[in-house]
Image (cartoon, helix red, strand yellow):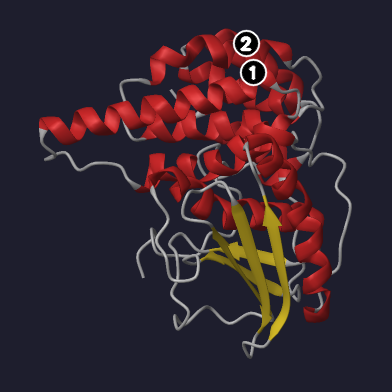
Amino acid sequence: MTARAEPIGAPVWFAPLRAPSWLVPRVRDDAARVVFCAEAWKGQPVGGAGRDLRLGLPLYLAEAARFGTDSRPVALRHPVEPRDALPEAPVVVRSAVSPGGRGAILVRVSDLGGARVAEIAREATDEATLGDALGGLPRAVAEAASRGGVRPVWDSMYALPGGSPLASYVRGSHACLRVTDEALSASADAEAIASRRADVRSVLTTLGSLATSTSEPFPALLFFGALLAARDAGSPVVGEFRMPANVRCTAATDPLDPVYAMAALVMRVFGDLEASERRIELLWESGDPSMRRWLARVQAVT
């Protein structure tokens, strides 16, 4: 199985941001596994406008489960057909969005044997009501998954915006993943390279606007994750996003804010090594071994 086909067991920003394990709750060895995946809406394909929403929804629900339950969630990268074999798990959560990518959402929660535990349907008329519908899904899914041994937990750090910004966050989760998964080979033709460059620019523009318009940390983590993924893929458009990155970095002044720590990494991307080292020095004093291991990885970024 290739890396691009493997289930995703961490938020999409986790790997590009050099695996900040101190940010993600630990999972017990005996935690119940929950698989999140997308499927077609009653056999109909989803149009271009709904692609990121359809494939972002499992990523969003898995991330919410990681921070809001005691489960071990994984998300599948690609949509599944009804008869597709899925990784074994006590709970399977299949989600679908209407072909237009905005009107309706359907989530089916099943047990390992395929028996339906719950069906959750939501309607939306615009981006704001879509965001409201998305905001209530993690709790509804957690309640349905309780039959599989999943229990809710509270995490003070995990907070997302509501309304239309949340809809942008869910779409952005898959867009961030695309920046990594759809990197071009060195032999790609000029047209493909130009198209890829335009797509990466569009993703970073949208996520940068989201990160600078909300105070919650996770939109910033998503933007920074996409930024680092683009940088690691050698995209030449990264330099165009220094301003929104600096706005979000400088706004984070509390060392307990995860965005403050991420700024130490992002500043290095834009060559501001002195400011990065100042933050690293302060964060090092926390004495957290996992934080220090992450800071060492940050210092390796040049």
Is the residue 126 above or below the residue 78 in the image?
above
Q: Quadrant of the N terminus?
A: bottom left
Badge 2: how crowded within 10 Å, few (<14), some, or many (20+)?
Answer: few
Instruction: Provide the secondary structure element on which disc 2 rests.
Output: helix
Q: Amino acid at mark 2?
A: Val
Q: Residue at x 64, y 41 (%)?
A: 20
The residue at 65%/72% (across/down) is: 108
Indicate left or right for 46 with 17 as reference. left
Q: Disc 2, disc 1: CB below 8 Å? A: yes
10 Å crowding of disc 1: few (<14), some (14-19), many (20+): some
Dividing the picture into quadrants, the one containing residue 105 is bottom right
Dot 1: what SS? Answer: helix
* Residue at numbered disc 1: 212
Give the Cα separation between the discs numbered 2 and 1: 7 Å
Among all residues in the image, which is located at the extreme bottom?
Answer: 113
- Residue marked by disc 2: 247
**Residue type pointed to by label 1:** Thr
